[in-house]
């Protein structure tokens, strides 16, 4: 790629060199005032492009930093403190039946619950923020189809008092036991508040029945036993989705969730040994939920660091580009500046002239960069929580930083221009 890039950018000057007018070049007067027009526009365009790209990277990095700070203070919809999680996968023929899987969960929960410092134990198939690949199913309603935007829901399989363990608020009704959920005659489910607002805004959802054709209960009518709060499954701040909670008996991937009375890390090893005592052949991934949350924060921080590093590199390149263009301008226009000084212009006026030209170049890059920033922030707002499309603070802050960089880069060429000796320059 580096070789291809070098060859590509060598084509422009080489193609220009092959079309040189030798008579015109040889007749050029070295005393001509001003910058030769050949190549000047291209240099200005390249520098303006560098500045626009710099502005885009700086704005992207700022947006990720804003998202990281908002993410650190945002709750996922439940009490994540003092939670330990032990994930297992019940593979093999020994766990082919739902009864065998539920027996493992019951025994593991009993052993873990006997550990001093453990307050509650339950289990789930998909832990919020840790398991993003949740299954979905179409939703069919018994009787009249209630109005709503989407007739689909994400599924979570739970056992025990899962809402009580994780601190998920029950807004209406109650939770269900494993026996109630597994009863083929009247299986019970929980739904979230968003689903109730969409389909039963003015009615009591308790006791209503629905069917999930793409779930293990595809042929059964499920009765709503309770309504729970919304949970952020993938990212905090995501738009709420329809969520249905069913029995864990139909899942092989199981996360035993433990609520500790104090620090969850203090009971982590004991909980691991308790689960391993049920089946020592099963790999166990034990961690606290604070570790899960910290991983998300580190992920956002790393993204901000990468984008910030790219923005810093682009900013340095833009500064070098501005310096090179202004230094070349001062070199070519030495006679113009000398004449201005000889005719009475002050050194400060020459300095302002050079800085003004630098700012005009920067203004072109900033103008194009603001368009790029508006597009990037609009896209980032759909990916990162807390980022607003067309964020004015981010755009203005990045623009001011770039303008200051352009002034700093052109300060030394401007200083050289104001210190010219008119007599010495005009004699050359």
Image (cartoon, rainbow, N blue to C red):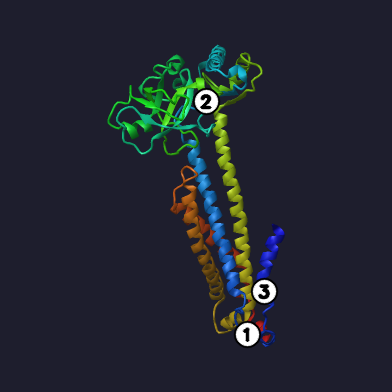
Name the quarter where the C terminus is drawn. bottom right
- Viewer-proximal residue among 18 and 380: 18
Query: Going 47% across and 47% down the picture, which residue do you hit?
Result: 381
Q: Mark 2 points at which residue?
A: 125
SS of the residue at dot 2? loop
Mark 3 or mark 2: name the one nearer the start of the chain.
3
Residue placed furthest toward the left: 202
Single out the mark in the foreground, 3 or 1: 3
Q: Horizontal and vertical percent for residue 214?
A: 46, 30
Q: Position of residue 283 (x, y in %)?
A: 64, 23
Q: Whole-percent x and y of residue 358?
A: 55, 69
Instruction: Work out whether mark 1 precedes mark 2 in sequence or the reverse, and give the earlier one.
Output: 1
**C-alpha span from label 1 to label 2:** 79 Å
Q: In this view, does 100 lie above or below 405?
A: above
Question: Does residue 183 appear to the left or right of 258 in the view shown?
Answer: left
Within 10 Å of disc 1 (Cα), the crowding (few <14, some 14-19, many 20+) is few
Q: Nearer the viewer, mark 1 or mark 2?
A: 2
Please give the count of numbered marks on the rendered protein: 3
**What residue is shown at x 52% (from left), y 71% (from top)?**
356
Instruction: Please name the residue that numbered disc 3 is placed on.
Output: 15
Q: Nearer the viewer, residue 128 or 149?
A: 149
Q: What element carries label 3?
A: helix
Q: Is mark 1 on a helix, strand or loop?
A: loop
Q: CA separation, marks 3 and 1? A: 25 Å
Residue matched to label 1: 32
Decide if residue 221 is on the left or right side of residue 412. Answer: left
Q: Distance between the residues labelled 3 and 2?
A: 63 Å
Q: Is residue 229 left or right of residue 366?
A: left
Tell me what residue is drawn at x 56 percent, y 64 percent. 49
Mark 3 or 1, nearer chain start: 3
Residue 278 vs residue 368, the one in the foreground: 278
């Amino acid at each position: 790629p580096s070789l291809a890039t070098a060859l590509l950018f060598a084509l422009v000057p080489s193609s220009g060199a092959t079309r040189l007018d030798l008579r015109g070049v040889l007749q050029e007067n070295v005393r001509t005032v001003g910058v030769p027009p050949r190549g000047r526009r291209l240099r200005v365009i390249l520098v303006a492009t560098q500045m626009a790209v710099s502005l885009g990277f700086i704005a992207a990095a700022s947006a990720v930093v804003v998202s990281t700070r908002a993410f650190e203070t945002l709750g996922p919809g439940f009490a994540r403190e003092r939670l330990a999680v032990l994930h297992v996968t019940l593979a093999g023929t020994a766990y082919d039946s739902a009864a065998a899987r539920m027996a493992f969960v019951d025994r593991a929960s009993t052993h873990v619950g006997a550990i001093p410092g453990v307050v509650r134990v339950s289990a789930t198939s998909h832990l919020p923020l840790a398991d993003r690949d949740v299954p979905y199913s179409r939703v069919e309603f018994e009787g009249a189809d209630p109005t709503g935007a989407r007739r689909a829901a994400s599924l979570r399989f739970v056992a025990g008092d899962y809402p009580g363990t994780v601190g998920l608020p029950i807004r209406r009704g109650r939770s269900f036991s494993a026996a109630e959920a597994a009863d083929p005659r009247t299986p019970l489910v929980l739904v979230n508040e968003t689903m109730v607002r969409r389909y039963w805004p003015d009615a009591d959802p308790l006791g209503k029945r629905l069917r999930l054709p793409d779930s293990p209960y595809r042929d059964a009518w499920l009765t709503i036993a309770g309504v729970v709060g919304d949970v952020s499954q993938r990212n905090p701040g995501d738009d709420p989705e329809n969520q249905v909670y069913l029995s864990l008996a139909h899942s092989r991937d199981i996360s035993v969730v433990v609520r500790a009375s104090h620090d969850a890390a203090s009971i982590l090893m004991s909980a691991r040994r308790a689960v391993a005592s049920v089946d020592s052949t099963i790999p166990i991934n034990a961690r606290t939920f604070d570790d899960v949350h910290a991983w998300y924060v580190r992920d956002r921080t790393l993204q901000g660091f990468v984008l910030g590093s790219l923005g810093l590199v682009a900013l340095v390149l833009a500064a070098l580009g501005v310096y090179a263009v202004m230094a070349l301008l001062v070199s070519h226009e030495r006679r113009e500046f000398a004449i201005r000084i000889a005719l009475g212009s002050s050194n400060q006026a020459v300095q302002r002239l050079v800085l003004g030209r630098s700012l005009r170049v920067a203004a072109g890059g900033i103008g194009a960069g603001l368009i790029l920033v508006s597009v990037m922030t609009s896209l980032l707002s759909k990916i990162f929580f807390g980022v607003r499309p067309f964020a004015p603070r981010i755009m203005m802050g990045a623009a001011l930083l770039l303008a200051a960089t352009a002034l700093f880069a052109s300060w030394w060429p401007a200083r050289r221009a104001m210190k010219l000796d008119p007599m010495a320059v005009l004699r050359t």
